[in-house]
Amino acid sequence: MKKNILLIGGSHGIGFEIALKLYKNHNIFIASRTSENLGNLEVTHIPYDASKDEIDMSTLPDTIDGFVYCPGSINLKPFKMLSPKAFEEDMQINFMFLVKIVHSLLPKLKNADQASLVFFSTVAVKVGMPFHTSIAAAKGAIEGFAKALAAEYAPQFRVNVIAPSLTDTPLAERLLANEKKKEMMDNRHPLKRVGQAEDIANIAAFLLSEESSWITGQVLGVDGGMSTLNIN
């Protein structure tokens, strides 16, 4: 049975890979600032900027079976160089805008037999890393929120979080700008490569499917082994 799945941010990177995997078998709605990469995909695009827009609920079906929130940031600096305003901005884009849209969607999510919600964290929440104070704080809020939401709405909703390590997407291009940087980042991971958008999209598609119907309240590390293996 076709599901109605809403992606917030799905025109590039991980969101686009999720759309690629799902659009042939489901009704995909993508709310994002741009649509130039969507090409011939049979999806419904809704112009939307999480920082300033409200989604027009009339553009969405009455039932939302799956929801993925993709917007995020990679603001890596020493703590002394991060102002409180920088923390607020990271918290807004990663967490507060997520809370806002989930709150708005509650009636449509409740109409599903069992809605599946997928959020994104980072390996840096589980593994303390220098220069990650702001992003780890914002993503840590997502993990706590997801577990509490999963408990509150079980069994009506399933809520899970994917916690990747560095993934080769437009958001991370500054960290992978040349072969030397990429090789260094590859070698930090036990599996000797950074993630690809498809690696993360595979897990997201699984969590949105009936094959994961007994999984909720989980943070899944998709990180090349970084969070659990020490091979140095």
Image (cartoon, grey):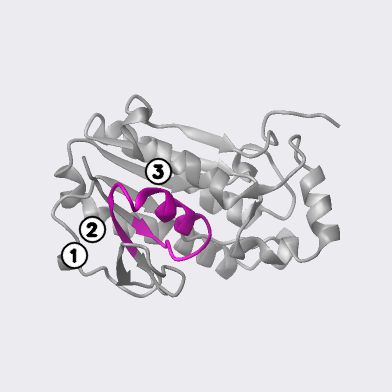
Residue at image location 31% in from the left, 62% down from the top: 43
The Cα–Cα distance between marks 2 and 1, rounded to whole angstroms, is 8 Å
Direction from residue 10 to residue 170 in the image, left or right: right
From the image, tell me which residue sits under label 3: 145
From the image, tell me which residue sits under label 1: 57
Is 57 in front, or is 183? 183
Where residue 51 sits in the image (x, y, percent)? 40, 71
Mark 2 and mark 1 lie on one chain; the one further toward the N terminus is 1
Magenta-tinted stretch: 7-30
Residue at image location 13% in from the left, 54% down from the top: 62
The Cα–Cα distance between marks 2 and 3, rounded to whole angstroms, is 16 Å
* Mark 2 vs mark 1: in front: 1
* Mark 3 vs mark 1: in front: 1
Name the quadrant of the C terminus: top right
Name the quadrant of the N terminus: top left
Q: Which mark is residue 104?
A: 2
Residue 10 belongs to magenta span: yes
Is 185 in front, or is 211? 211
Mark 2 and mark 3 lie on one chain; the one further toward the N terminus is 2
Q: Quick check: marks 2 and 1 in contact, CB under 8 Å? A: yes
